[in-house]
Image (tube, grey):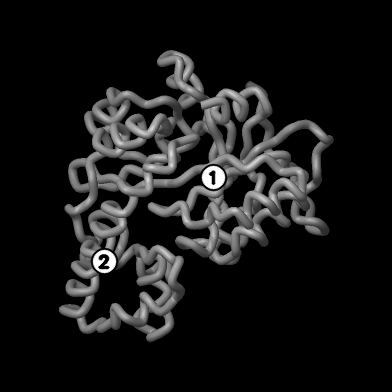
Amino acid sequence: MKKQKLSWSTKCGWCLLNNEFRADLHIHSCCSDGTDTPLKILDLAKAANLSGLSITDHDTIQAYTPEIFAAARELQLELLRGVEISSEWQGLTVHILAYAFDEHLQEFLTQVQERRIERNRRILEKLKKKGIDIDEQELKSRGPLQIVGRSHIAAAMLKMKAVASTQEAFERYLKDDASCYATGGKFAPHEVIHAIHRENGLAVLAHPHFLKRGRFLREILCLPWDGIECYYSRLPKEQETPWIKIAREHNWLITGGSDYHGSLRPYIPIGASWVDEEMFRKIARR
């Protein structure tokens, strides 16, 4: 499969390539922790000269309304149903991308969302003990469709001036192994993979480049994956090559995407990483 990085310019953000088929398979909307609506994401994808995309919000598929599919058809964009599900192994987070699944996956996602709410409460309790009192109802008021996560807690901490930046919030309090991170409650990776396969979907290990090495990683790679997200965001080629090799050794799909979050990460545009038509068809055929 052929894949390229976009070349950058200060004038337009990135230089459009030719009209070859490109699909960004990792994008977040305001239904989870992105800042753009699903409809705006379609417009941005078209402007970036993409041919296909997948909106992979955290633990929710609420972006996939009849309206969004109609808009995609009008823009001549191929929209592939996707979601990013958070799992946990040995106290560390493992993100799993699911594609081309049946609608009944929503039943499992509801369970995931309920566990997310409980995890958030434990985080808020730990923060309160450190003098950072965040109202859970205020987090919920962000919108009926939005899945609340650590990024929203970090934003609330910044708003109340408990930290100087959201990065500080994660480093000091919220990242895995930080003082206020709450473990437990999430499904294990093998449980998530089983749920995806039960609904005829494909389970892809998301951004493996950041996983803990050693025994932890070896155990994760022993799971029945369908693919690995080898092409990720704006990582250099040398960080992607080892994962391409692993995927080929296991005969797994080689996927890729930008992990676009809108203004939350303005330095990462839609289409920063992508897959070609051959790989997109392999996934979509499921």
Mark 2 is surrounded, within 10 Å at the Cα level, by few (under 14), some (14 to 19) or many (20 or more) other residues, namely some
Q: Circle 2 sits on which residue? A: 120
The residues bearing labels 2 and 1 have C-alpha atoms spaced at a distance of: 24 Å
Query: Measured along the vertical axis of the image, is residue 166 above or below residue 197?
Result: below
Residue pictured at 48% horizontal, 57% vertical:
62
> Can you tell which quarter of the image residue 120 is in?
bottom left
Q: In screen coordinates, is 37 left or right of 86? A: right
Query: Measured along the vertical axis of the image, is residue 236 above or below residue 241?
Result: below
Q: Amino acid at mark 2?
A: Asn
> Which disc, if any, is residue 26?
1
Residue 212: give x, y in percent of width and height.
30, 39
Q: Quadrant of the N terminus?
A: top right
Query: Measured along the vertical axis of the image, is residue 8 above or below residue 162?
Result: above
Front-most of 144 and 50? 144
- Secondary-structure class at tag 2: helix
- Secondary-structure class at tag 1: strand
